[in-house]
Structures are given as structure tokens and as C-alpha cells.
Amino acid sequence: MMGEQVIKMPDIGEGVAEAELVEWEVAVGDQVREDQVLAAVMTDKATVEIPAPRDGKIIWLGPDIGEIVAVGSPIIRMEVEGDGNATPGEMDEPVMRSAVDDGSEPQSPGAAARAQEGTAPAPAETAQPDAAVPDAKPAAPAKPGSAPSGNYKPIAAVPRADGEKPLASPAVRRRAMDVGIDLRRVPGSAAANRITMDDLDAFIASGGEAAAHSARRTRDTSVDDVKIVGLRRKIAEKMATAKSRIPHITYVEEIDVTALEELRAKLNAGRGEGRPKLTLLPFLMQAMVRAIREQPQMNARYDDDANVVHRHGGMHIGVAAQTDNGLMVPVVKHVESLSLWDCAGELSRLAEAAKDGTASRDDLSGSTITITSLGAMGGIVTTPVINYPEVAIVGVNKMRIMPVWQDTQFVPRKMMNLSSSFDHRVIDGWDAAVFIQRIKALLEAPAMIFIED
Amino acid sequence: MTDLSCKFLVIGAGPGGYIAAIRAGQLGIETVIVEAAPVGGTCLNVGCIPSKALIHAAEEFEKAVHFAGDNPLGISAGTPKLDLAQTIAWKDGIVGKLTGGVAALLKKAGVKTVKGRATFVDGKTVRVDGEDGPMTIRAEAICIATGSVPVELPFLPFGKDIISSTEALSLSAPPKHLAIVGAGYIGMELGMAYAKLGSKVTIVEAEERILPLYDKELTRPVQKRAQALGIELLFGAKAKGKAATGLQIETADGKDATVKADKILVTVGRRPLTEGWGRENLVLDMHGRHIRIDERCRTSMAGLYAIGDVTGEPMLAHRAMAQGEMVAEIVAGEPRKWDKVAIPAICFTDPEIISVGLSPDEARDGEHDIETAIFPFAANGRALTMEADDGFVRVVARKDNHLVLGLQAVGKGCAELSAAFGLAMEMGATLEDIAGTIHAHPTQGEALQEAALRALGHALHI
């Protein structure tokens, strides 16, 4: 007998009451194996994959991608062998709202339509009379295609496990070889997941691997629609806000970091194995601490609706970091209270946490000014976008050795640009230039960073 | 000394070699095949075909003997007589027809056949010594298809009364007493044939049972029939050498004994023929006693392919043929690799055994749970009407998706079921596919459908 298994939005913990559905890994009608990933949901903190609790067939998918769903709401229904966990007739409506809208609409029309389709499991199969006894010895050959017996239970196509040989007839295998297609990549539609000639044709028609084997260059008229969801959507919103509300002024200056690099190398050489090494960033952060002491308007959050600039005493420097999911900005708190080495340690902790997804909400919020760096990728100039509602962002460009005219000759110097943007509503160009020139002076004579006035 | 050069050269015109050459010819490749003996190899000349002819004659003779005595069919006939020399001549006629046919097919495909023995000079060059005088053949691609030979025991060297399967297929009269060393398929097939022709057959086997490559369930009906034919089976016994009156053996309990025999047939297996054709002039990786090949039958040397028995087990003509066809297509530039699901194996014993794919034990060693079911011929109408009610069809399938993993049968004449078995395996049939196919009534093949139905839990005739 077949039962129904309902999968609900799991309690992800830490007091999270709802999560955004960011990805469906399956479609209605798919056969799935136990532990196969069905969906991905995202909270402010983390992305969580939802696995299948057992083998079965997907009969209903609740929320649309991008919808925010309350913990405990049903999101997937599966048809499973034996008893499921759903009582007949039970159909508690999922509580969900669109992530993009304001949340007043309880359920999107798309989800409702899919729910209707999904909850009607084909009744034809069960309606077959089991009592139909097949004629054991037909007097004349039956019509081709007529089923010999009514009580065969159709066997489910179980998805191919990793490493399992694809199943196909010799003719299909030969054609696949001729056109250079690896059958392991072709989904099979027949019993036992066998690949039919139609499956192979469909795979070829869909592009498959055939394109790679075509020597000719062909026009590609395909359009791939990528839904902007999750972190990507948040980044998009934030960037749009920053660029539409803040008139940016960008100021680029070159810095001679030869002395700084010498100092950094010496400090690192004296440092024991296995301890975090100094990058350029802790020096820049310390220099910013000193520069901001003289220009507190740089370390601020501008509430432009209330027309108030909140100048913060504490310096919380956000450091933009690229992760597999997109841009994240972990924050080093109270840099004014940290030593150079403390800065380095905190930076390395945050970078790890952002990469492996363990950064806490606290780690990712509360910055008052931001540093952005493309690292080794570099570039000579960038036009950084201010991390709204802050008022300044300092961009680090790639360091390179350049000939510099000194006294009577060219000398090779390690040069690096800083590309920085400021909110021109509250920071004048002159002040921006003073700020960067102060940082330049500190970085070019790094001892000055550490000498108390 | 003449020189020849071609695109594709095949060494050995057995089933693998001649198929490779014919297919290459069809594909328009300039092909030469070298063979010292008549074309057709072991299979056509001294293997599959002549042994089946002898087995058929023995069956017919045994029937006549059967009808001369009491029998349930109510047939009475006179005591039959056998002229084995005429039987052999008849067999030789069939062999001649078939080898002549192969020669004609090679010619039709545009393949040049060179008679003689080939020796590799290097990876691209072969010297042939034969009727047409010595010649050198250079080729872009060469396929080694030298086959295999019967294994000889050092204490029972072939010659005179110690014979291999080759001589056993050309005796002028059945031996009065025939001792056979080895109860593999060749020993069992020939032993049963000679028992039917009137020989007193004793089979000496070191293992504890006949046909060790097949499971006990399959071999039990064969063993029963062998004993009914009066064959003495000595298990756990070792051949020691020739005695004045027959074969010296050590019995299972360690005693010396003599098996009375005027002929001793040694059938302890076949070994790849890897010597005598200049392998020492090549740098071929070996795998045990056979040439190592990859999934495209490529050896460790570029442009050198190997197929058939010289590449190891299973040493079966139909495997060599499939390899030969594939190599010809690869040489023609087609993208091919070995992708066969199963190679059927048959014992032409009485009753016959056929096995395709995995046995239940082999399947249990795999990663999937299995279902297995047998349907006995005792419940099959056609089998009963042919006095062939011993045996069964067995099906092995995956439990989760019912994919058929193996099909076996033992029973009179069931070798012909190999076509259905092989097709089912190669097409990737499930139990439902077999159960849902109408099998004509009344045939032994219905047992296949019933076995599948039984695995599904609803056999109709048992």
C-alpha cells in the first residue's frame, strides 16, 4: 500500500521562525531516494538543505522559490511505500508569504495551483479490479499492446545511484557512442530507469553534450532565467538602495607601501609558526583609526529619512568578502580597542566564518565604515559602492612595483592605490581628500601609526 | 620474398579473427588475414561445431538403443549399430561446408587470406612462412587472434592413447573404456557423448563435483543423468600418469588405483596461445597467462589489438566474435567500446545448461537486494511431451526495481533459450517485461515467463 509523507519546514533553531525557500532540487513526479536533497531554505544566518526522509515520489511542492515559509508549515508531499506520516484528509495550509511582497498575501496563486495538481494521485491504477483473471490460454493472439493481466503493479523507476551503470538497449548505446554522449548523464524514463531512444533524442535535442562535439560554431539562442533569491536578492536590494540614495564621490590616490611592506615582512618573520600572519589590512585599519580620530564624520551611519548622521565612537570596520554564495561583509568590532595583532586574528576568524557559513548575525552586522578589497585580483582603480547607511568606504587596489622618480633617478617602489567613495551629501570632496591623504601619510611612514601623539 | 602492406592485419582466422576481417572488409578497410590451418579456428575445426555434431550423433544412437528396449513410447526397434568412421566423415562434411563458407565470406568482403604461420618482427611488421613462400606484411593496425590450445599435463603428454578434445572428435571407433581427466564442460560433453555411443566412461575430477563453474542447482540434473548413463564420477581424485591398462590415479582417500582405459582424454582446460608467433619481439603487457587488453581490446602497444581466447576468460567464440566486430569498427574510426551486459555460457551436456548474467550467489555479492525464482520443467507441458521434464528456468532480479540480473536454465534443448535470455539482459528487461510478454504455448520458453511471474509472486502454473 502507498502512504503519504509530509515534509514540513524544519525548525532550524536559534529562534528562527521562518525561512526562505531558495531552491527546489526536485519536481513533482520525481522519484527520489532516501537522503536525496529535495530543497534548500535560507534564513538570515544559513542555508539548510532538506533531505528526503525515505524513498518515494514527489506529489506536491508547496512554496514558490523566494517565498518565506513559517517553521512547521508543510512544504513537500511524497507518495511512499507503506504508511506515510499524513492522515487522510489532513491538509493544513502552509503559512507563507512572498519574500518580495510585504507579507500580507498568505499564499501565492502558483503554489495553490500546484497543490491542486499534486494532491490527486492518479486514481486509475487503484481502480483496476484485482479480480480480473487473465485468460491463461488465449485462442488467438491478442492485440499488440493489450496488457496480459490487469493486476501488475507498475514498478517505480528508482533514480540511478552514483556510479551505477546506465541501462539501455544495444541500439541506444550504439547511437549514444556515435554521437559522443555519455549515457550516465542521460535520465531514463522507462522501468528500472532504462534509457529509451526517445530519452536519448530528448537529451540531444535539449543540447546535451552534442554541442561540445560539433566542430562548427553555432548560434546560441537560449535564454537562461536565473531567479534572484536568497543572499543574491539581498545584495541586489542593498546595492540598489545605496546607488539610488547616495551621491557617491570617488577619490583615488596612490600610496608608496615599500616601507610598510618591509615592516610587515619583519613582523611576520618574527612571528611563530601557526599564528595568523599580518596582511596589509590590519595596518590600514589602524591607520583609519588614527585618521578617524581627526575626522569623526567618516565613521558614521546616515539616517537620511530623519536627517541625522549618527557619528559612532566605536569603530566597527566591515570587510567585504567574497564567498561561494556571494558578497558578505563580516565586521571587526571596536577596532579602536584592538592591537595590530588582535586585528589580524579577528580578520582571519571572520574570513573563515564567512566562507564556511558559520558567521553569526552579530558578525555580519553593525559596521560603521567598510573596507573593500579584491585581493590578488586587484585592478588599478575601483569605484566602491558605499555600504548603506554608512558614509565612507575604502577600496584597496593591487600592489605592484612601479618606477618612481626620486631626487635624480627612477627607483623601483611598491605602489598601491586606494579607491574610496564618500557620501557627498554629508562629506565634502575636500574632507574626503584630507582623510585619504592622512591615511597615505600614515601608511607611507608606518611608524607614525603606532606613535601616540 | 614478397612484401605486402595493408591497413589492417589479422593474425588467426578463428571466430574472432575472421569476424574482425570480414567486418573490416565491409567497412572498406584494406585487410589481410593470416592463418596456418583451415580458416574457422578451433571452433569450426576441432571445437564447438564438430563436438556438437558428435553429441547429436550420440543422442540419436542412444535413442535407437532406447527404442530397442522397453520404453514408455511403445516404440520397438532393432538393435542399432554404429559406424563411427562414417559419423566422423559426416561431421567432417559439415566442418568443410562451414570453413568453406567462411573462406567465401572473407573473399566476398574483399579480405586477402594468406596461408601460413605469422611471426611478429616488430609492432607493425609480421613475417609469414607458408605455402606462398616467406613474405613480410606491414600494417597500420594488427589484431592478435591466436586463440588457445588444450592444456597438457606433464605426466600425461598428448600422443597415441592420451588424447585431447581434438583427437576425441576424430576417433574411428568408440573406445571400450574411456578415462577422462577433468569434469569441466568439455570433459562432461564428450564423456556423455561417448557413454551414449557405448564407451564405459570414467571421469576423474579433483574438485568435489562436476562443472565447478556453475552452481550446484544447475549441475545436479546433469550429474544425475551422467550417472544414469553409467558414467563413473571419481571426485576428489587426481590423475597421476599412464598405467599399462589405463590411468593411474590417487583416489579421494589417498589410495592409488588404476582406471581401466584404452583412451585417456585430458580436458583440464585451455590456455591462451601466447607463444610461437613472435610475442618476444613485442612489448605486450600480460595479465597472468593472457594478453592484457582494455575496453577497446587495445594492448599495451599502439595499433596492436588482441581478441578472443588469447585475451583470457571467458574463452567463448561468441565473445571473440563481438570483440572482433568491435575492433574492426574501431580501426575504421568509429567510436566503440565494450559495453555488453552479458556473455551467455552454455554446456551442451545432457541436459543442457545455459547461464546469462549473474547467478543468485554472484548477485548476492552485489550491492542490491535480489529476488530469485525457479520454474521447473516438470510443470511445463511442452517439456513433458518431450520427455524433458528434468530441469528448470531460474531468474535473478534486483528487488528494488526488478531489473533482471541473471537468467539460467538446465534442461533438454534449453541452449536455444539463450537467445531470449541474452536479449532480455541486453535490453535491460525487468521482471514485468518478461512476465508481460506473451510466450507461445506450448513451448519450453513459457518456463521463462512463469519464472518471472513467480519472482513477482503470482506464477500461474505452479
Image (cartoon, rainbow, N blue to C red):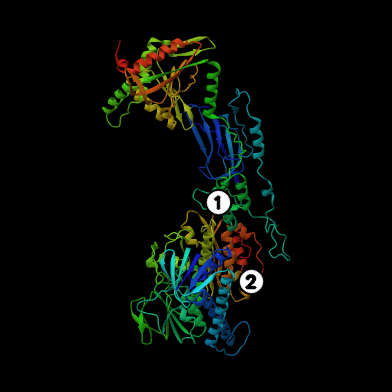
- Which residue does the image show at 73% across and 65% down from the upper left? A140
State left or right for residue A271 relative to residue A120.
left
Q: Position of residue B402 (x, y in %)?
A: 57, 55
Badge number at residue A59: none
Q: Is residue B148 above or below residue A435?
A: below
- Which residue does the image show at 73% across and 66% down from the upper left? A139
Does the image show residue A168? no
Does the image show residue A27? yes
Which amino acid lies under the numbered mark 1 shown in the image of this protein? Gly
Q: Position of residue A344 (x, y in %)?
A: 35, 24
Q: Position of residue B354 (x, y in %)?
A: 53, 68
Which amino acid lies under the numbered mark 2 shown in the image of this protein? Gly
**A210 or A66, nearer to the observer:** A210
Same chain under badges 1 and 2? The reply is no
Considering the numbered disc 1 on the image, is that residue within a helix, a strand or a loop? loop
Q: How many marks?
A: 2
Quadrant location, the C terminus of chain A: top left
According to the image, label 2 marks what residue? B381
Count neighbours of disc 1 (C-alpha within 10 A) and say few if under 14, some if 14 to 19, many if 20 or more.
Answer: some
Q: Is residue A113 above or below residue B324?
A: above
Give the letter of the chain under mark 2. B
In front: label 1 or label 2: 1
Give the letter of the chain under mark 1. A
State left or right for residue A342 relative to residue B49.
left
State left or right for residue A86 relative to residue B198.
right
According to the image, label 1 marks what residue? A180
Q: Position of residue A288 (x, y in %)?
A: 38, 16
Cα–Cα span, label 1 and label 2: 48 Å
Considering the numbered disc 2 on the image, is that residue within a helix, a strand or a loop? helix
Q: Residue furthest left?
A: A270
Q: Are marks 1 and 2 in contact (CB under 8 Å)?
A: no
